[in-house]
Image: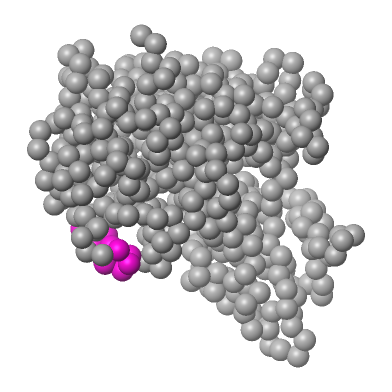
Amino acid sequence: MDDSHETLVRAWAGRWRHPDWRARPALADAARTLSYGQLHAAVGRTAQGLARAGVEPGDYVAVAMERSLELVIALLGAMAAGACPCPLEPRISAGETARRIDAAGLRWLLHDEAHAPLAEASGLPAARRIRHDALEGRGADWPAPGIAPDAPALLLFTSGSTGNPKGVLLSHRGIANNARGVLAHTGLTPDDVLLHVMPLHHTNALNNQIFTPLLAGARVVLAGRFRAEDMPGLLERFRPTIVTGVPTMYARMLELEFDPASLRGLRFARCGSAPITEALHRRIEALLGCPLVVSYGLSEATCTSTMNPPRARRVGTVGTVLAGQAVTLRLADGSLAPPGGEGEICIEGDSLMLGYLGAQATGGRPAILRTGDLGRFDADGYLSITGRIKDVIIRGGENISPALVEGVIAALPGVAACCVVGAPDEDLGEAPVAFVTRAPGAAAPEAPAICAAVLEALGRIYVPREVHWVDALPENAVGKVDRKALARRLAGGAPARARGEPSPHA
């Protein structure tokens, strides 16, 4: 059937209750498995419970819950009610929660018992804070399966290269377009089993690892948050056909022993969110015994715009363009790069976001998304990333804003100026490194104190791997700090992670 204009909510509502689907396993964890029929009913009860609590179509609903099947059902239920869920990352501070609620106009907070203190400190009135276990849904009908394709479907906060995180508002049309494109590229079927170990507030973890396989009738196994030492047991128990991760995750699996039988069913492994070297790519494929499929995308384009076909992957590229999207390379003046030439990667099509909400929010839905990344297409349409215009640092798949770190360090007594750049890192891909100048006549803080201040203000992923004291920061011809000059100082090697620094997925 032609469902090219159908929303995922409508498709899910129709398919999951169909007699051919009802008994199939849909969503599982270590303790239980829900069939598609059971998932349909659970999502319907959640959607009705939210509607009875006062949530209306179009409302933005923050969701603060522990990683669980209930969290997945809560997000799906909010969408089925016509609302727009916004999953909050684990261990987010009360202050940042309140800031996002205010900046993005989040009207409701759906939470579990573990997040009750966070809910109380959120700034929302009690009537708009809903305990998940207090929802009162009746029956299994979905209140809003006919929601408009251009209505808001999902709000994800992402940290870009400038300032505080901002909300990326995705449409129902966009998430459906992404899902159909991924299905066409990967050939997902009801026989597939996807092992899910990535954080549930990331676009890939939702769009490609929940929404898409549940559209295909596949089974999603929700394991705990990623720990490398858990992976051999998880693969042995659940025998997945697909696993997804970032380069750091796979790198940490290389020294572990896997039962060959547990790897035999893998059709492919997916990788994205951060650069990967050819040497690491080939080591991962040798370990898993299946193709490693590298892809490329941004939250602002829903999720994935290019992907290597599993049966025709090319190492060193991020694959070919997904159906329903247009990816072009443009020069600084906006004109198209010549065939085979380098240009800024630009994305068009139905997957583009509705716009930003919150800090630095400007404009609405873009006609063309300029990514800030540089690339080159080969003669067969495979895209290679050749560089980044942006200053953003990608540490183990997490985007880090240098400006945020610089702001914390520059505010410390005894610091005159600071510049943070990304340094090559064998484990993380990139890691932040700080170059700092001392204020005249003042006692400057030691490196451990600087790292402690960043940890307290921003969190562990922002902590510099190294702190270098310099007499002056290099400047370019117009008097701006020359980040490239500092990066070149670090580009000669990829030192191991500093002793005592926590894992990016700890």
Q: Which residue sits at x=10%, y=33%?
A: 139
Tell me the chief SS of the magenta region. Answer: helix
Q: Quadrant of residue 499?
A: bottom right
Could you tell whether 59 is left or right of 421 in the image? left
Quadrant in which the N terminus is drawn:
top left
Q: Residue at x 20, y 31 (%)?
A: 142
Q: Position of residue 132 (x, y in %)?
A: 20, 50
Residue 225 seen in render: no
Q: Nearer the viewer, residue 99 or 220?
A: 99
Quick one: quadrant of the C terminus?
Answer: bottom left
From the viewer's perspective, tell me whether residue 311 is left or right of residue 391: left
| Residue drawn 69% across the image and 58% down it | 421
Q: Position of residue 165 (x, y in %)?
A: 52, 56
Q: Magenta residues, as a range?
A: 113-124
Residue 157, how many percent across, how many down? 47, 50
172 or 414, nearer to the observer: 172
Is residue 415 visible in the rendered image? The answer is yes
At horizontal 47% and vertical 27% (from top left) the residue drawn is 178
Which image quadrant for residue 489?
bottom right
Left or right relative to 225: residue 491: right
Residue furthest top in the image: 1
- Decide whether residue 458 is among the magenta residues: no
The residue at the far left in this view is 138
Number of marks in the rendered image: 0
> Residue 118, image x and y in percent?
30, 64
Nearer to the camera, 283 or 220:
220
Residue 117 in magenta stretch: yes
